[in-house]
Image: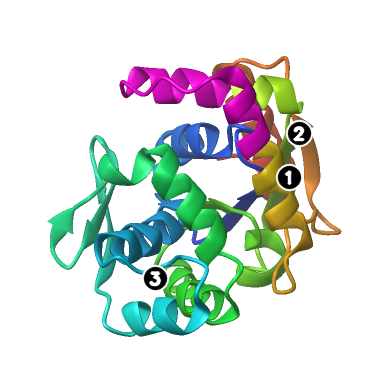
Amino acid sequence: MKKIAIAVDGPAGSGKSTVAKVVAKKLGILYVDTGAMYRGVAYACIQKGVDCSEEGTVLAVLENLELELQPTEAGQRVFLDGKDITEEIRSQEIGRGASQVAVIHGVREKLAEMQRKMAEKAAVVMDGRDIGTCVLPQAEVKIYMDAGVEERAKRRMQELEAKGECPSFAEVEAEIKQRDENDMNRKHSPLRKAAEAVCLDTTKLSIEEAVEKILDIVREKIGEV
């Protein structure tokens, strides 16, 4: 496939990572989960006992961080200083930390630079909060995925329960709302729909339906794939 960039943005729980991963596989191109990178930074800070909201110490940790995303047949793996942390970064604690480090301008600048380099080397489906607006404003296809708060909380509950965590629904819903607040109102690169992005409400869509809708959008934008 020709070298293109497909940017998929949206709030937590909208299904963008799950759907973007399948889209990338169907197109035979690289999938980049940028949220995993912020989780990786949060994981490193928490492991070192660093407060994820303290800008100076977080940036000090980031300066010496070796963070790498590796595509595999089973999906993207996340490595920190050579250690595979793909599963460890999916906990509630790391999610909260990721939300905190993501508001730090220096963190966003550093990770955005890494993300752009990935897109320079290959065709990508990249998902996150500011891909179409800041990281890859030149992306040929831009999608903004969303879903109702209750539905997003249900999805997150299922994900956490599958990992053996047992939070209350009220707790998960509150965290989703707080994440939205952080993402949409941060000073640097807030979550918002790019002007050219196509909106996709996934509240009542299955994964397969959402994937097909995005593939239809890709075909419409760039032709047959």
Residue 97 falls within the magenta-colored stretch: no
Residue 218: name its quadrant. top right
Q: Work out whether 47 lies above or below 113.
A: above
Indicate left or right for 36 with 64 as reference. right
Query: Which label sits on residue 144?
Result: 1
Along the line of sight, which residue is nearer the eye, 184 or 111? 184
The residue drawn where x is 39% and y is 71% is: 121
Indicate left or right for 7 with 37 as reference. right
Q: Residues within 10 Å of mark 2 (few under 14, many from 20)?
A: some
Residue 192: name its quadrant. bottom right
Query: Which label sits on residue 22?
Result: none
Chain-order first, disc 3 or disc 2:
3
Q: Work out whether 34 lies above or below 55.
A: above
Indicate left or right for 30 with 220 as reference. left
User: Do tag 2 and tag 1 residues touch (Cβ < 8 Å)?
Assistant: yes
Q: Work out whether 97 lies above or below 20.
A: below
Q: CA distance from mark 3 to mark 1?
A: 24 Å
Label 1 is placed on what type of residue? Tyr
Whole-percent x, y for residue 65 in the image? 27, 76
